[in-house]
Image (cartoon, rainbow, N blue to C red):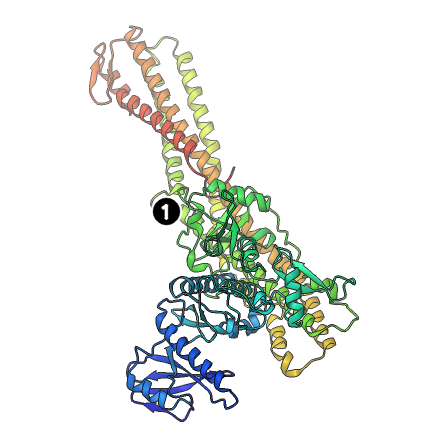
Amino acid sequence: MNNSLGYFGPWQLKRQLGVGGFGEVHLWQNVKTGQEIATKSLKENPNLSKDEVAKLHQRWEQECQWMMQCDTPYIVRGLNDRVDQEFIAYLTERHPWRPLQPVVMEYCNGGDLRTQLQLVHNVNGLVEFEVREVLHALRHAIEYLHIKCHIEHRDLKPDNVVIHQEAGRRIYKLTDFGFARTITENTMLKSIVGTRNYVAPEVLDTAEYKNTVDYWSLGIIAYEVICGNLPFIPHQTLYDIVTSIRKKPAKCIAITENFGGEKGAKYEFHERIPVENHMSPVFLNKIENWLTTALDQNYHTRGTRLAPSSKERTLTFYTELDAILAQKVLTVFFLPTLKFYSWEITADMTLLDFRKLVQGETGVADIYCIFPTGHPRPVLSQTYKPIDFFVEEWEHNRNGNNPPVMLYIAGMKCEYNAAPPEIPTHFKKYLHSKEEIPNWLLSSIEQSTHFLLSNEQFHLEAFVGGLKEYALTMEHEIFQYDTDQNGNKLQQYFNELIEMHGRVEQFGVNIEAAKQASAAQIENCDGFFGEWCARALKFKEDFATLEGLKNKVNRYYKSGLRRAKEMAINPFFDQLKNKDAYKLLEFRRHLENVQKVRLNGKERLELCRTAVYDCLGQREKIIMNEHLKYAYSAITSVQMEFGMLKRIVHHSLEELVEMRNALAQNTINFHTKILNIYKSGKVQRTTLAQDGSSPIIVNGNSEMANSINEIFQYPLTSLIEEVTGRIIQMDIDEDMNRNSDLPATIDE
């Protein structure tokens, strides 16, 4: 097929998508409906024998049939049975291998996984979100082929994983069934097919294997998408690769050449994935364990584990991977030390469990949670669980539209203390090597350099972004403290002060008025009223102490709100976040030009050395910058002052409640004593208002009754009911506080 075809009916040939040793792929579009399809056709090859031609015919027809048979979102579907047959006939007529039909299939618009891995920013592997997406798709594709179709693919590799981008998300699909074969019961296949570095060792070693070859290939792909490298010395000869794999221990998941090492230790066997990757430790630890069964050199036991109870081998290849991919990993950035953390969050985990996790890894118990802008849970509630912090849409934390983490944490009493950078092992061993370094090792050193630069840039962006979110959160909390209609503590505090001021003043005035009105009629007047005037004075003094805190509360509130606003709009944060501080983009351009410019080993090594030293020097200037340290300390001090403000208000409100109850009780006591004095007959005939509105004639003195009626504003019965109600409410509040969950700061 050639590009001169142009049109057939509504179908227009758009362009060639790819070409290989045997065939080529083209993109077609229906100009009426907009539908896009891909067509795969064979190229002419006069050098093939009759047997080879016959075998190719058979494989091609089988591939076309299998692709139409597969009906799953994880495998590219063949459309030969769904497209206008006249169009199929048109394509077949122009196919160099007619009467074989070209394979018509759904078009995936994002290229293939190999192309993604070759992008310079993916030199250290994909981000965790994309790794999970790739493994999820391929895991289901393999199981579908093995269980539903009884097919083994035998050529799993990034080149055969295509991508369809839809609604901003990549959908990965398996394609190319050129080497696929039907799984036959109790029969070991003996043909040698596959692609170097992805094919299972038994295929090359004995040519006897079964469908577990696909498990091995997926393990290789998993390792590669995680760190950007193939696991088993890909630069070595096929003989050395297979021989080394046969020697690897059961827990070994990678083999590297020990350049410059001691004699007899040419290769190193590794149980861990290189640290230069973008995975969370939670994911990495479990995927490394899964890789031990996926990369089991024994194809009979590959993908299985010994069951603890029966001691028999059971297939765990899918269930283990499913459990890993189902993890909900909460990503957190701890501002004081500029460190990322990640924890697996479960539905039954409590805030107390979460605090223990944080304390266990950071050593800090008194923490403050900061939610990035746009978080569905913008304010920490005592009813939340850690699972509420998890935001599925933000798992792709390297997407510029998403925050780098789901939660920032500040240490309430934790000093700014940036953790030292992690220097990759390759730098320590080879950066000053005087030996001529081979290309494969130079590539590894360049990968390590890129990781250092990109990792430091990511930490810097997370830190300045976190500082801005910290300031925004403090501004919002302080502002809400004075405007929240559901619980306006500040206004309640001010109102309670005003009301209590009136109550205290009234209490003293009432006593003084009673003293003046009764001076001529009550025996030992001075002694009796002296005690009560002292009580009134004590109430005034206690209230004056509480009222004196009002100025401090006002000062903290206005100062905190002003400073938080200033920090939230400080352009310094955005400038620093968007700055290529460590010349990462410059180094990426170098990586893109390595092959074009053909730099020698010394030049490449010198570029890495310069990039590393520049990065470390610049990091010291930026991270320890006085402006940045001041920004952190300023926001922290605002948060601490606001915490003090809330404690003052909370304590004052409690004191005001106690004072109000005490005033009410003292009013009742004073009222009662006055009544007892009058009832005892130690005064002249007097009328006393007992309910505050209906005078009761005690001894017929109505003038005295009116005077005392004015003194007591609160009827005796009403006062007793009010005090009783407040005591009950205090008991309820005490129980609620005792049984409530952790407060917003998750204090001890």
Q: Is residue 492 above or below residue 369?
A: above
Instruction: Write the residue at 55% across / 59% down.
Output: 279
Looking at the image, residue 365 sits to the left or right of residue 615; the answer is: left
Can residue 386 be seen by looking at this rendering?
yes
Q: In the image shown, does 82 or 250 lie closer to the viewer?
A: 250
Q: In the image shown, does 251 or 673 lie closer to the viewer?
A: 251
- Residue 495: percent from left, percent from top: 37, 38
- Residue 290: percent from left, percent from top: 53, 55
Which element carries disc 1, helix, strand or loop? loop
Picture quarter containing residue 686? top left
Looking at the image, residue 745 sits to the left or right of residue 663; the answer is: right
Residue of label 1:
484
Residue lying farthest to the bottom in this orientation: 4
Circle 1 Cα neighbour tier, 10 Å, few/some/many (<14 / 14–19 / ≥20): few
Quadrant of the rendering where the N terminus is positioned:
bottom left
Picture quarter containing residue 732? top left
Picture quarter containing residue 394? bottom left
Residue lying farthest to the top in this orientation: 681
**Amino acid type assigned to the residue bearing label 1 in the image:** Asp
Total marks in image: 1
Instruction: Write the residue at 25% across / 17% down.
Output: 690
Instruction: Write the residue at 47% across / 89% down.
Output: 44
Q: In the image shown, does 157 or 147 lie closer to the viewer?
A: 147
Can residue 622 be seen by looking at this rendering?
no
